[in-house]
Image (tube, grey):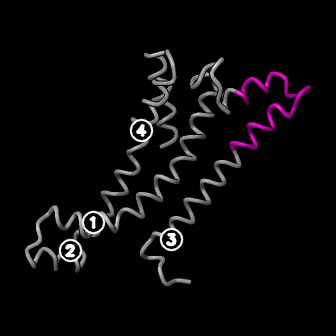
Amino acid sequence: GQALSIIIAILIRLVWNEGIFPLILAMVAVGWIGSARLVRGQVLQMKNMEYVMAARTLGASGPRIIMKHMIPNISGLLITNMTMAIPQAIFNEAFLSYLGIGVQPPNCSWGVLAQTATQVYRAYPYQLIIPAFFICTTMLALNMLGDGLRDALDPKMRGKY
């Protein structure tokens, strides 16, 4: 997941060295794989459930089963997965920018701020502490949001409290 995304970002950056587009392309090229694997596994599991078999037996078409049964049951999982993927994308961008592969100065990102601050952190430690604080706080907040959404949207979790 993350290591593959970083390797692909480096390779795309070697080929295409201008702007933020190669970084976005690399993150998108790899970012969907985990979600696709999760959705596929969930659909294969639901395919043999009683309510899907009952709908098939009553003559429901494939698109109707997908719209009425599959998508509502997968949407919570997918929303939660996407919410958890946002902090990962933020971290990947900041990490690649810190290494000098992502966003390039004079454009600004938390990774660029942290990278430029490492050169003067002994004299001005706040220049490194502030971007690191905001990276950590944003990642923590979005992870907590994703955790809350998982608890609220996961049908297996209902009635457990």
Residue type pointed to by label 2? Val
Q: Which residue is mark 3?
A: 152
Label 4's element? helix
How many other residues sit within 10 Å of disc 3, few (<14), some (14-19) or many (≥20)? few
Contact, mark 3 vs mark 4 (Cβ under 8 Å):
no
Looking at the picture, does residue 45 appear above or below residue 157? above
Label 3's element? helix
Looking at the picture, does residue 83 appear above or below residue 25? below
| Cα distance in 3D space between marks 2 and 1 | 9 Å
Label 2's element? helix
Kindly report which numbered mark, 2 or 3, lies closer to the viewer in this rendering: 3
Contact, mark 2 vs mark 3 (Cβ under 8 Å):
no
Of pointers 2 and 1, the one earlier in the residue sequence: 2
Q: In this picture, which residue range is highlighted in magenta?
A: 113-135
How many other residues sit within 10 Å of disc 1, few (<14), some (14-19) or many (≥20)? some
- The label on residue 97 is none
What residue do we see at 29% from left, 68% from top?
A: 45
Which quadrant holds residue 124? top right
Q: Which residue is mark 1?
A: 70
